[in-house]
Image (tube, grey):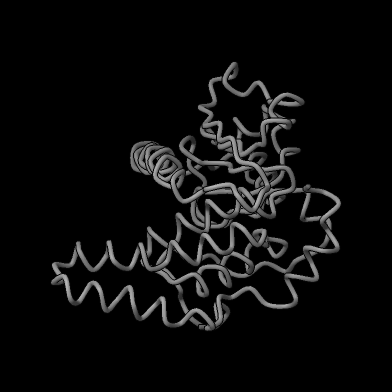
């Protein structure tokens, strides 16, 4: 599916014209959910002005010792996730915790939009342009997901969340996310786990829809047999990650 010409999900935001400098900023991937590097946490007043009341910090043990932004002191709810950039790091088991946190935030966002309407302050909206905000900007409940460079660990969780929320396959989700943050490219270990996560989601969705056990097995088997199919991770992102690898180790 070409994300430029088809709607991969009902909350699709339009593709961005990418520039290298945008790597150092955050982008809104779905309404109310932003992805970016740690540097976005430096200006806490800006986060508050933009209605970012929830942050997910995806850090290695070493990174957490070096720097942990004091967001909670300013009323921002923070989910700390210890994730190593390692082939042996299990992330699938952490997806439910991440999803619960984001869902709680987005429920607050929707309530704020319903009760107060979107932010209409011209100065704040001008500031929001640098964050590539497209959806109505709620006064609270927006979520910022951060890892060191916003390329691998943080986006892995957002990709998994979108797959589950909109019942999308990995290829479609990955292509879409890259239209909003072009530099996204999970490491090999995380990419393989996203591939493993896809049949798990399909089986869960089949179960919710009331499928019989043989039908669920066929769903899982069909995905397992398509291991050589495209996953949306092309050679171009591979080269991009090599060029940017100095930012995340």
Using residue 247 as the reference point, say whether residue 38 is left or right of it.
Answer: left
Task: From this view, report whether residue 241 is shown above or below residue 74.
Answer: below
Residue ID at (44%, 72%): 169
Using residue 33 as the reference point, say whether residue 102 is left or right of it.
Answer: left
**Residue at the outermost top position:** 73
* Residue nearest the observer in this picture, 78 or 130: 78
Task: From this view, report whether residue 245 is shown above or below residue 106.
Answer: below
State the image coordinates of residue 132 (x, y, percent, origin top left): 65, 55
**Based on the displayed image, in which of its 4 quarters is residue 219 positioned?**
bottom left
State the image coordinates of residue 230 (x, y, percent, origin top left): 56, 81
State the image coordinates of residue 208 (x, y, percent, origin top left): 19, 62
Residue ID at (35%, 63%): 201
Residue ID at (77%, 25%): 66
**Based on the displayed image, in which of its 4 quarters is residue 176 positioned?**
bottom right
Using residue 225 as the reference point, say whether residue 246 is left or right of it.
Answer: right
Task: From this view, report whether residue 97 is shown above or below residue 189.
Answer: above
**Based on the displayed image, in which of its 4 quarters is residue 120 positioned?**
top right
Residue ID at (59%, 16%): 73
**Residue at the outermost front position:** 88
State the image coordinates of residue 237 (x, y, percent, origin top left): 73, 70
Task: From this view, report whether residue 89 is shown above or below residue 132.
Answer: above
């Amino acid at each position: 599916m070409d994300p430029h010409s088809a709607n991969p999900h009902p909350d699709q935001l339009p593709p961005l014209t990418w520039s290298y400098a945008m790597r150092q900023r955050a982008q809104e991937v779905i309404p109310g959910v932003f992805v970016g590097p740690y540097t976005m946490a430096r200006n806490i007043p800006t986060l508050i002005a933009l209605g970012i009341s929830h942050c997910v910090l995806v850090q290695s043990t070493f990174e957490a010792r070096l720097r942990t932004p004091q967001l909670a002191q300013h009323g921002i709810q923070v989910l700390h996730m210890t994730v190593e950039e390692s082939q042996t790091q299990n992330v699938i088991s952490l997806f439910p915790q991440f999803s619960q946190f984001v869902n709680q935030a987005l429920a607050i966002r929707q309530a704020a939009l319903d009760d107060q309407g979107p932010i209409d302050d011209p100065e704040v909206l001008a500031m929001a342009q640098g964050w590539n905000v497209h959806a109505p900007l709620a006064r609270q409940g927006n979520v910022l997901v951060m890892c060191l460079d916003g390329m691998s660990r943080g986006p892995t969780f957002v990709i998994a969340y979108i797959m589950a929320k909109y019942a999308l396959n990995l290829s479609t989700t990955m292509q879409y996310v890259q239209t909003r943050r072009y530099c996204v490219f999970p490491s090999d270990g995380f990419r393989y786990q996203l591939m493993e996560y896809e049949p798990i989601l399909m089986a869960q969705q089949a179960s919710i829809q009331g499928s019989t056990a043989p039908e669920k097995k066929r769903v899982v088997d069909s995905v397992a047999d398509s291991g050589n199919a495209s996953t949306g991770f092309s050679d171009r992102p591979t080269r991009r990650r090599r060029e940017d690898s100095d930012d995340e180790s």
